Amino acid sequence: MWKKSKSRRIFEVFNVLFMFFMMFIMLYPLIFVLNASFSDSNALIRNGGAPLWLPLEPTANAYVMTFKNPLIVSGYLNTIFIVIAGTLVSVIMSAMCAYPLSKRGLMLNGIITKLIMFTMMFGGGLIPFYLLVKNLGLTDNLWGLIIPTAISTYNMIVLRTGFAAVPESLSESALIDGAGHMTILFKIMIPLAKASFAVIALYYGVAYWNSWFHASIFLQRDSKQWPLQLVLRQILIMNDVQTGETAIDQQQNIAESIKYAVIVVATVPILCVYPFIQKYFTKGVMVGAVKG
Amino acid sequence: MNKFVKSISALTAAAICFSIAGCGNKSAVNNEEVKVTIPEGYPVAAEYTDGVTLRIWSTFTPTAVQTSMNESKIKAYLEEATGISTVYEHPAPGSESDAFSLMLASDDMPDIIRQGGWNNPQADEHIDTGAITDLTPWMEAGAMPNLKKLFEEHPEWDEASKTYSGRYFYFPMILGDDILKSYRIYAIRQDILEKTGLEAPETIEEWETYFAAAKEAGIKVPLSIPMNQWEHPFIGAFQVCDGFYQVDNTVKFGPYEEGFEQWIRTMAKWYANGWLDPEFVDQTASRVNALVTNGDAGAFYGSVGGHLGTYLSAIDPASGIKLDAVKVPTHKKGERPMYNASQYSVHSAGATVSGTSKHKELAMKYLDFGYSEEGQIMWNHGKEGESWNWAVYEETGEKYPKYEDIITSAEKRPEGASMGMMLGHYCDTGNPVSVQSKWYLLQNNATPQQRKALQYCNDTDVEKYQLPNAAQYVPAEEYTEINDKMTPIFTYIDEQVAKLIAGKVDLESGLEEYRKTLKDQGIEDVIAKYQELYDIYRNK
Amino acid sequence: MAKQNAVTKKSDVKKVGYFARLRHDLAINKSLYLILLVPVLWYAIFAYGPMYGALMAFQKFNARLGIGGSPWVGFDNFVRFFSDPYFTRDLINTLRISIASVVFYFPMPIIFALLINEIDSRRFVKVVQTITYIPHFISLVVVCGMIKTFVASDGIITTLVSSITGIEFKESLLNNANLFTTIFVGSDIWQNIAWSSIIYIAAIMGVEQQLYEAAAIDGAGRLRQVWYVTLPSILPTIITMLILRMGSIFSVNNEKILLLINQLNAEQGETLSYYIYKKGITNADYSLSSAAGLFNSVINLVFVVATNYISKKCSDTYLW
């Protein structure tokens, strides 16, 4: 234990103040978006981008309209499925890749790692990728949003780093005790590399939540299959590209506030996820497991 | 050695995928014999439709009223009228261009492809690669009698609908009336005019008087306009058109003309005087819309519906802000303005029949319906009794199809649906495969200011100077080269013009550099190229 | 300190011996290789499968004809790409933004993570983290709209800068080409610093308490503890992140450029990918974007290999 010196206390005060400052500037976008979503559309248009500390001419109209949009509800369901299934698939595949690659002794690791890293930088482009997915029958199918992009090399490397930090001795003693590699993977590696798993699970989960591009080219038959972010994007575009001849209706300029309501609806849930993951980043992962 | 083994396996895997991806094994283009078997008239008898459902690919943005065209009433109306059953497929908004290419690349093309921009240099390519069907032999065999009749009555439409090599390739959207051609308008503050006793400005001098007065009356931004590659408002008053055009059969490029430099000087003066929006390079919708709707702008240039229409309903009625349309600025008072941004009568939007379709004749029959009298009304207005009824237009006494309350009245419509959405549900007015009707536009822009604006913005001489789109057809091989030359030219113009106007660069020396750089970048070669094409076109 | 990510260097034993050892290795570690086989197959199909698409760069690609049918044009597309009058300017802009991003953005999440670690209250930390993540999730379109408001002539950031430097700004800061990179990278920091710090926080939490205690016994104050214990412990993570970052260094977020660029700041704001996007608007020029993409990838490759090599020489951490 170290004593708390005066300079330490001053630092702590500044640190906390700094954190409050950070929170304040980070909170603003959400405040603006929340207020805008509860504002009257015409008032919003007149306001432009000026800061909003309170809703203008408050109304919950935008939310009513949003939830009446059938694509929002289907979008939510689709996204939830994609996030859960996708994160599971991705984490498992990444673990199956990272674990062997983290072992020092494997001879083919070097060349395989190089080949994998190569794919991080080089790709074939959209058309061949699309054709591949289509020929595998994965278009117009939610699994087409998961399987073709299951492994992110970036995340896999992060996990590999996590595995490599676990001392060799642990798995060796397990092997001596007769455990197979799958057992080791599940009973030893995963619990000990919990933090890394939590990190990549979070990264994958958020990536799946935010994704829209692949959905936009693979899901063409049925807009009811669209994930939430694609629906949001369509609403945002619809608002910015106003065809010259058609006007938003005289009496109902409601589109402007709907834009923000949809953003809130598409963003707030994922924000609530982090506190639950946080507990996996705990200290002292390995104290006392093996001596030396 | 293991590297070798690994590479071999990787290559093998790739080869497997290569064949899975099936590159090269496309569905055979359907080169069926051109034969017209379906008799004229609608609905088509069941023996000819054979239970077939045509697949139509079209761009579409879901609205609160419908998530796809399959849910629309107009689709049902058309099916009923033609006797032909259809199903729609839509790419996600924002990815249309990629989706289009992917559709061509994949083995799964629909029967009909509808989109908003059939750029002609690629049209020939599309025919040659089998992506779309060459309609010429079919036209001659009588598969599209309604369209053919229209072309006979309007030879200029006929001319404009062909590719560079002279083939028919699409069922175009045709703008049926001049009032549909332009929708970019000039508008000012009526209340300022009243306050200062000025008349609506028509010439540059009058505009400047207006700006000074507006500034005096406390308006922060007397003029808010966009400026980009395609539009330079006020340019017509300097006797120059935008882009490529011709005067007495000599092809010119607007931004390379003397008049354009005058325009730059004037804009720079307006900027320096605080008349032109200091943030004119930032055309973010929210900023610009706020300027006008809360009274900070004295005048603006924009779209009759998307801008003027939106503003009219967003302005606080209690604020006293009144907007009104004005004429397109002209060089000399009383003279008809030379130019305003206008579309061609034969629009680049339209429908094609894909090369692999197995039901070509049926598809053409379906699309041809839109050009019959009955079809024109249906595409533009929907079904009589349900979405429209005959009425008399007060101003002219003409008989016209008036939209029903379900479309026009906010109370009768489902909640959250705008008029535009309802129009898209009962009719297909955006890019109809038909002749677009002025009655749609006039009813959709029903305020007096908007109607006035539509009148004014189309009251120009632009047709005299527009290069007929047929004359801008460039053979597909040369298009890339021209685009490669023009992209840096447009980039330079965009940036330099903004810098000159905003005073970042000394005006006179900057203008000299401007002219010199354009020449160095080869603009004269491109102008010569278009002149060559225009001459060929005229001598045909 | 345990060697992380160390890979057995290939020995210099004769080939005969090598193959024998390989067979032996495969036999002993059969289950490990089997586990690895599934992801490797995935890479073969989904990452290497489409790679033939890079050939588009050497063709005049037509979507209908496909790669099998489009005509070959050799290096034409690259010539078109490199000989464009704006190529050099856009290349420099891209480099400037990428390098600024690594130099200025990269350290920020690390510092933030260290500061978070100094907070005692678990609850406060949770609150801070949850709130500071918010900008990362707000759609880029909305964020850029806010950025424009902040740096407008009457915007809050402009006012702040004004009061500090004494300069009066009559127009948006975004109209000043020289400030583009700063605004671009600065707003990146604002939007993503907290999110990027997650991995470092996780790493910091993995440092054994005993090491701190040992250092304290040796008389080190907190600052020295951070310098001599925390940083070295998370150095492998930092280096790994840095090498990975290099793999996409040249890829500047095109959507953000699109949202922030205007005619006055294009001088320093226009990147190569934005230019290609402009060129392709009227006709989808897949060949050109493929060639540009290849160029992009090669540059990324050079950076990654160089960084990996340097870190191999200077530390125990490297990716391969």
Image (tube, helix red, strand yellow):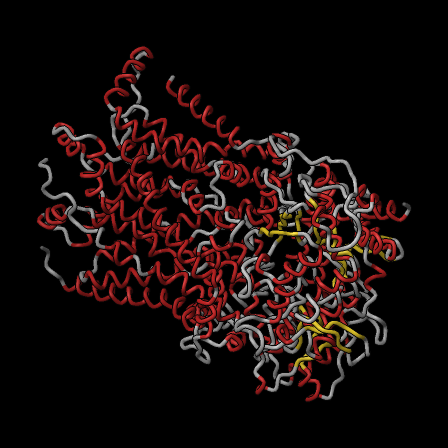
Q: In the rendered view, would you say B450 is above or below B77?
A: below
Image position of C87 (left or right of A98): right
Q: Which quadrant of the structure image shows residue B398?
A: bottom right
Q: Residue at x 58, y 56 (%)?
A: B70
Count the numbered circles shown. 0
| Horizontal and vertical percent position of residue B367 | 72, 52
| Horizontal and vertical percent position of residue B134 | 76, 41
The residue nearer to you, when weighing C121 against B262, is: C121
Q: Quadrant of the C terminus of chain A?
A: top left
Q: In the rendered view, would you say B230 is above or below A133?
A: below
The residue nearer to you, when weighing A183 against A14, is: A183
Q: Residue at x 64, y 67 (%)?
A: B423
Q: Quadrant of the N terminus of chain A?
A: bottom left
Q: In the rendered view, would you say C194 is above or below A253?
A: above
| Horizontal and vertical percent position of residue B529 | 80, 45
Asked whether residue A206 appears in the rendered view, the answer is yes
| Horizontal and vertical percent position of residue A109 | 32, 28
Q: In the rendered view, would you say A118 is above or below B337?
A: above
Asked whether residue C295 appears in the rendered view, the answer is no
